[in-house]
Amino acid sequence: MLGNFTYCNPTKLYFGENSLQNLETELCKYGKNIMLVYGGGSIKENGIYDKVITILNKCGKTVFEDGGVMPNPTVEKLYSGCKIAKENNIDLILAVGGGSVCDYSKAVSVSAYCEEDPWDKYYLKMEDVDNKIIPVGCVLTMVGTGSEMNGGAVITNHDAKLKIGHVFGDNVFPKFSILNPTFTFTLPKYQMVAGFYDIFNHITEQYFSGDDDNTSDYIMEGLMKSLVHSSKIAVKNPNDYEARSNIMWTATWALNTLVAMGKSTDWMVHMIGQAIGAYTDATHGMTLSAVSLPYYRYILPYGLAKFKRFAVNVWNISTDSKSDEEVALEGLCAMEQWMNEIGLVMNISKLGVTEDMISGIADSTLILEGGYKIMTRDEIVEILKKSM
């Protein structure tokens, strides 16, 4: 493990089929005014909404609803949520939904009392929070983002053609999160497998960086193998509790900051994917799956040793009578086979990207350091073209 780091994760997790019963315990810690945040209304169809409302009423809370959070929460929606939160003196934001709902809730939590334009302050200038923060709690209904145990909050600005994530400090992490795997059973297959790849890519973004013998890499290899195994089961039987519970737990640990310790990390697949999302509003996990292989094949020569290790330790590729490059490429082929098997989108044209968008998407892609190669705009264009 290289470098120096500080690790803290203050989120309390309740996991399992009976985990929702702990919501009452947590609600007692906060004031009366609760802002209930959810998405398009599926929680009303599957009964989760009624269960949550019953508990809120039992605890004597006054509920202010903020529904309709879209898969890629917009800056306009953020402004609307801030108005609800501030005008009603909200004591706790309760996010009931997937990663977008959790992300949005954290964005509102830091923005409601921000005296500046929160888009400008947090997403363009990337400044820290210096105002009142409304605490957030989560009831998770979809896995993928890890937003239930981190400080990430992604917001889309369609006018600016930008989709940007701000990773806030542990003061913005959800205070508690309730993880009941059965709440994910009714998710449509497309959204389910998109979430699976979001999890996987969170791990690879951190894994493909650094050259030292790092404990975090061993943890990530185990998480990836578990996810691949359970995802194959879940695609065939979405109600397999063991598989779905393992996936839910893997999603949380993939991006709750633990495996990033001692790593420089490479988030370029996410940066490209988010730029695509700003242009198309495509499902986040599918924007990642569509560009991952072209990106990883491009940077493979610069991080050959780690790609070889990935092939051997995650995909069980034999090294007999093969060059390091051959082993590494076989690993990516095995990854591609798995991606096709579970039904991921493998090219960006299927997400609505056209040739005339590529230049703009490249311009909207934030270039980050930390990976095996610092990309140029022209290289982003090349990867986008290979992803078509």
Image (cartoon, grey):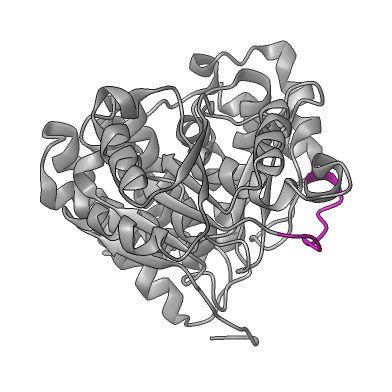
Residue 57 position by quadrant: top left
Look at the picture and state if 23 lies above or below 67.
Answer: below
The residue lying furthest to the front in this view is 60
Magenta residues, start to end: 123-132
Q: Is residue 190 magenta?
A: no
Residue sitting at x 79%, y 50%: 122
Task: Residue at 12% x, 47% y: name it.
Answer: 241
Q: Residue 176's image quarter?
A: bottom left
Residue 328 screen position, x and y as percent: 42, 55
The chief SS type of the magenta part is: loop
User: Residue sitting at 60 percent across and 63 percent down?
Assistant: 265
Q: Up-down: is 6 above or below 281?
A: below
Quadrant assignment, res 84 = top right
Asked whether 38 or 227 is in front, the reply is: 38
In the image, 59 versus 79, the foreground residue is 59
**Is residue 310 something that shows in the picture?**
yes
The reply to whether the magenta stretch includes residue 127 is yes
Q: Quadrant of the C terminus?
A: top right
Tell which of 105 and 362 is nearer to you.
105
> Is residue 329 in view from this perspective?
no
Which percent across, then down, holds residue 206?
53, 62
Relative placement, left or right, of 245 versus 219 is left
Q: How many marks?
A: 0
Task: From the top left corner, tell me how far across and down residue 38 is, in percent.
Answer: 46, 33
Residue for point 78% across, 23% down = 360
With 238 as the anchor, is 37 left or right in this view? right
329 to 11, vertically: above or below: above
